[in-house]
Image (tube, rainbow, N blue to C red):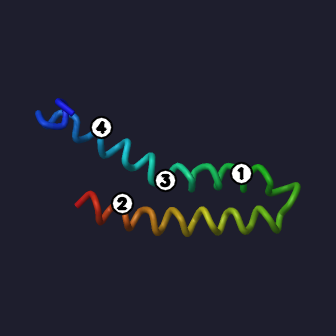
Amino acid sequence: MILLMSGNGILQLIVIFYIVCHSPAIVTLIIGLNRLKSRPENAKKLLIFSGVYFLIGGGICGALLT
């Protein structure tokens, strides 16, 4: 909290916020890429979900951080 008050920790807060917002999309992207050969239909759904999550999450994160 002291770092945020002095202004030095704002970048760290932004990075942590970005990671928290996009970690589910990164996890589903990795799972979708791993399942691409074994279950292509399921992998396609996971890849589409992660792409939509990145798009919406980027918009929300961008709006909150500006």
Crowd tier of the residue under label 3, counting other residues whose Cα lies within 10 Å: few below 14, some 14–19, many 20 or above: some
The kind of residue tagged 2 is: Cys
The kind of residue tagged 1 is: Ile
Question: Observer-nearest residue: 3 or 41?
Answer: 3
Q: Position of residue 22 (x, y in %)?
A: 49, 53
Q: CA distance from mark 2 to mark 3?
A: 9 Å
Residue 51 quadrant: bottom right
Horizontal arrangement in the rendering, residue 33 relative to residue 63 (left or right): right
Of the two numbered discs 4 and 1 on the same chain, state the one appearing first in sequence: 4
Of the two numbered discs 2 and 3 on the same chain, state the one appearing first in sequence: 3
Q: Is residue 58 above or below residue 22?
A: below
In the rendered image, the residue lying farthest to the left is 6
Crowd tier of the residue under label 4, counting other residues whose Cα lies within 10 Å: few below 14, some 14–19, many 20 or above: few
Residue 43 quadrant: bottom right
Of the two numbered discs 3 and 4 on the same chain, state the one appearing first in sequence: 4
Q: Position of residue 1 (x, y in %)?
A: 21, 33
Badge 4 is on which residue? Answer: 12
Q: CA distance from mark 2 to mark 4?
A: 15 Å
The kind of residue tagged 3 is: His
What number is the disc on residue 31?
Answer: 1
Q: Are marks 2 and 4 in contact (CB under 8 Å)?
A: no
Of the two numbered discs 1 and 3 on the same chain, state the one appearing first in sequence: 3
Q: Is residue 24 above or below residue 1?
A: below
In the rendered image, the residue lying farthest to the front is 1
Q: Secondary structure at mark 3?
A: helix
Badge 3 is on which residue? Answer: 22
